[in-house]
Amino acid sequence: MVDPDRSVSRLRKWAEHLVTLLDDRFRIPGTDVRFGLDPVIGILFPGIGDAVTGAGSIGLLALALRRGVPRVILLRMILNILVDVFAGALPIVGDIFDVAYKSNRRNLELIREHEAPESKPTALDYAIVTLGVSLAILSIVVPLVAVFYFGLNYGPELLEHLRLR
C-alpha cells in the first residue's frame, strides 16, 4: 500500500532539489545574485531551458494540488508560469529575466505559505491545475518546436552564409 504522506514528502524533496538546481544553485561572486541552470541552459541551448522550467512547473502544480493549496494561490502559480513563458520567449533577454524572476522558486514559496494538507481538492481545483499543466506543456513544446523548425529550415543556410565570410 502506498503511504500518501511519504509520497508527498518525496515529491516535496524532489521539488526543493529541482527548484534549487534551476533557480538558485550558483551565486555571482561578490554579490547576492543567485541563479540556476535555467538561464544557463537557455543561453547555451535555446528552448531547452524553457522546457526544463516547464517540467518543473508541472511538478510544482502537482505538489500544490496534493498539499491543498487554495484555488486563488493555484491561479497565482499559473500567472507566474505565464509570465515566465512570455518573458522566456525572448532570446537572451528571457534568460536574463529568468535570473531575476525565478517562477519555480516563487511557486514553491507559495506552496509553503499556503498549504493546507487536510483540505481535499475539488473538481474546480483539478480543472485549474489542468489549465496550468497545459500552459506548462506549451512552455515545453513551443520552444522546442521553434528550435527544431528554425534549425531544420534555416540552419543550413545560416551555416553556409557563415562559411562564405
Image (spheres, rainbow, N blue to C red):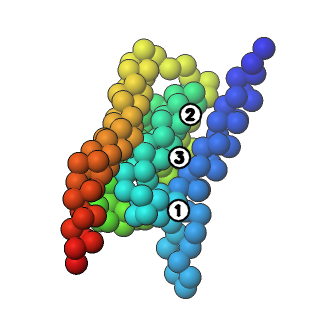
Q: CA distance from mark 1 to mark 2?
A: 21 Å
- Badge 1 local density, few (<14 within 10 Å), some, or many (20+)? many
Q: Secondary structure at mark 3?
A: helix
Tell me the quadrant of the picture where the C terminus can be found. bottom left
| Tag 3: amino acid | Leu
| Tag 1: amino acid | Gly
Residue holding disc 3: 108
For residue 91, which quarter of the picture?
bottom left
Q: Nearer the viewer, residue 73 or 157?
A: 157
Q: Secondary structure at mark 1?
A: loop
State which tag comes first along the sequence, 1 or 3.
Answer: 1
State which tag comes first along the sequence, 1 or 2.
Answer: 1
Tell me the quadrant of the picture where the N terminus can be found. top right
Numbered circle sitting on residue 63: 2
User: Where is residue 143 drawn, in percent x and y?
Assistant: 33, 46
Residue holding disc 1: 36
Relative to 141, say whether 130 is above or below.
above
For residue 3, which quarter of the picture?
top right
